[in-house]
Image: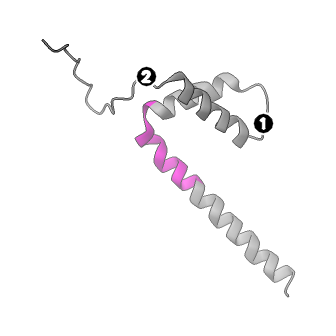
Amino acid sequence: MKPHKPAQQPGSNGNQNPEPKKIQHRSFELYLNRGSVLGHDLDDWLRAARELRAPDEAAPVKLVLERTVILLALALLAIGGLWFPD
């Protein structure tokens, strides 16, 4: 007889309890992205756990941030080229 698996909640992605190592890794990334500022360890841990539980919700935000950073870098390069022509 196979063990019974509980049914997933509607909208659940099956990742309700991420591994502590994954949370630790992501929270460290958040710490580094903030410039290694101390005092936000609990916030980083909770955010990492929330992101890993619902990666589909966090992905669009991350994508928008990455695109914004790229566009900002390109704008700065363009401005730099105008200020310091070859």
In x, y percent, where is residue 56? 41, 42
Which mark sits nearer the N-terminus, 1 or 2? 2
Q: Identify the element where label 2 is drawn.
A: loop
Q: Quadrant of the C terminus?
A: bottom right
In the rendered structure, the answer to whether residue 3 lies left or right of residue 86 reads: left
Q: Which mark is residue 72?
A: none
Main SS category, magenta section: helix
* Residue type, numbered disc 2: Asn
Q: How is the image coloured?
A: one colour
Total numbered labels: 2
Find the magenta span and give its range.
53-65
Q: How far apart are labels 1 and 2 at the CA level?
A: 26 Å
Q: Kindly identify which residue carries mark 1.
A: 36
Q: Residues within 10 Å of mark 1 (few under 14, many from 20)?
A: few
Q: Is residue 60 positioned above or below 80 on the image?
A: above
Give the residue drawn at x 33%, y 33%. 13
Q: Residue at x 29, y 33 (%)?
A: 11
Using residue 10 as the reference point, say whether residue 60 is left or right of it: right
The vertical placement of 36 against 59, above or below, is above
Mark 2 burial class by Cα count in 10 Å: few <14, some 14-19, many 20+:
few
Residue drawn at (47%, 46%), measured in percent from left and top? 59
The answer to which image quadrant residue 38 occupies is top right
Is 37 or 20 nearer to us in this picture?
20
Label 1 SS: loop
* The quadrant where residue 8 appears: top left
Horizontal side, residue 40 vs residue 6: left or right: right
Residue under numbered circle 2: 17
